[in-house]
Image: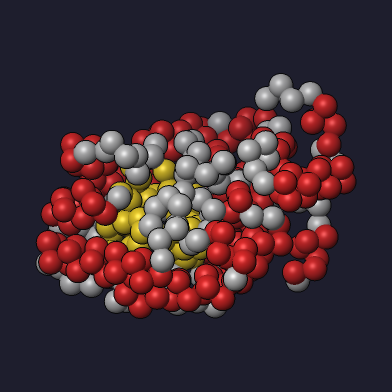
Amino acid sequence: MKEELLKRVPLVEFPPDEMKKLIEGFTPEKIASFLDVTDLRADTQAPKITKIAEWAKTFNCASVCVNPVEGADILPCLLKGTKIKECYVIDFPLGKIDIALKAQMAEHTVKKSRELRGEGNGLIELDMVINVGRFKKDPKYTLEEINAVCEAADGEHVKIIVRSSELTLEENYSVSEIVAKSKAHFIKNSTGMDPYGALPEHIRIMREVVGSNFGVKAAGGITDAMTAMRLFYAGAKDKQLQKPELFRLGTSQPLNIISSMGWLLHATEHWVNAGIIPCTICPYHYTEKLRREIREESNTYCQECKFKEYRKHKEF
């Protein structure tokens, strides 16, 4: 499987008939149930956390995702009495603190949240960033740090952010294998602050590697329903995968996604037939700020890609 994937010239394509069928299986209410409503900016304060918690409660979203410093002080009380989960990022966004501190941060956050909310276990999620540099040098370290945080989380769900934009195709495959055999529950592509965010190709790799019993979360630049549907096609096309415990979308713009889902249903055929410029959803188009080995890999795949003509006219 790995060899076949690495030889395949990448780009998820979206057959109109299949996309139309997928879209028609959704409603604004359904897509809302997959959203982790997110605000991870450095200057976010209590009023904004209160606002996004209200959005999540109004539309019955999956979780509210915030930094744990201010968030864990108020979010448990804001979500008390609901089924909406609190989601906190751990070692965000660089993933560079050592394993013991990561585990301590996870343990402290879970304990604080449980005490404030007072509703027992199963209402917290932790999105942990791996140390990408250490992964490239020592993959065993990555498994160790993931499992340490999972153990510290005391049964609460842990999502692993792998910063896929900074990895080669083979590294994306390898890190997905590591996450799949760890004690984690989800793999997630991006912090939303990486060189680029959620692209269907990386989400497809993750799903192909982790299988159908493991969660996949797409994050970064998801602002409308059509973008969300392409990610569903890549990571949760089959109905059995269309459950919040198996697929999520992290977004700071939930209202736009939910409202545009209505427009997408109103004119599905027009949206589907309009298509998209392939390079704009291909990871090999966004390499200017990345390391040399990723740029070199990009050039190799672009030369073999049937859409390579688009790169002659980069007016998009």
Q: Residue at x 12, y 66 (%)?
A: 115
Q: Position of residue 123 (x, y in %)?
A: 26, 65
Q: Is residue 203 above or below residue 176?
A: above
Total marks shown come to 0
Q: Residue at x 85, y 32 (%)?
A: 309
| Residue 193 can be seen, yes or no | yes
Quadrant assignment, res 120:
bottom left
User: Which quarter of the figure is the N terminus placed in?
Assistant: bottom right
User: Which quarter of the figure is the C terminus placed in?
Assistant: top right
The color scheme shown is secondary structure
> Foreground residue, 185 or 191?
191
| Residue 23 can be seen, yes or no | no
> Foreground residue, 257 or 147?
147
Q: From the viewer's perspective, is 154 left or right of 226? A: left
Q: Is residue 69 above or below residue 310?
A: below
Q: Position of residue 72 (x, y in %)?
A: 21, 55
Q: Is residue 71 above or below residue 205?
A: above
Q: Residue at x 83, y 60 (%)?
A: 7
Q: From the viewer's perspective, is 257 left or right of 120? A: right
Q: Position of residue 159 (x, y in %)?
A: 43, 63
> Foreground residue, 56 or 40?
40
Q: Position of residue 154 (x, y in %)?
A: 29, 76
Q: From the viewer's perspective, is 306 left or right of 103? A: right
Q: Residue at x 29, y 69 (%)?
A: 104
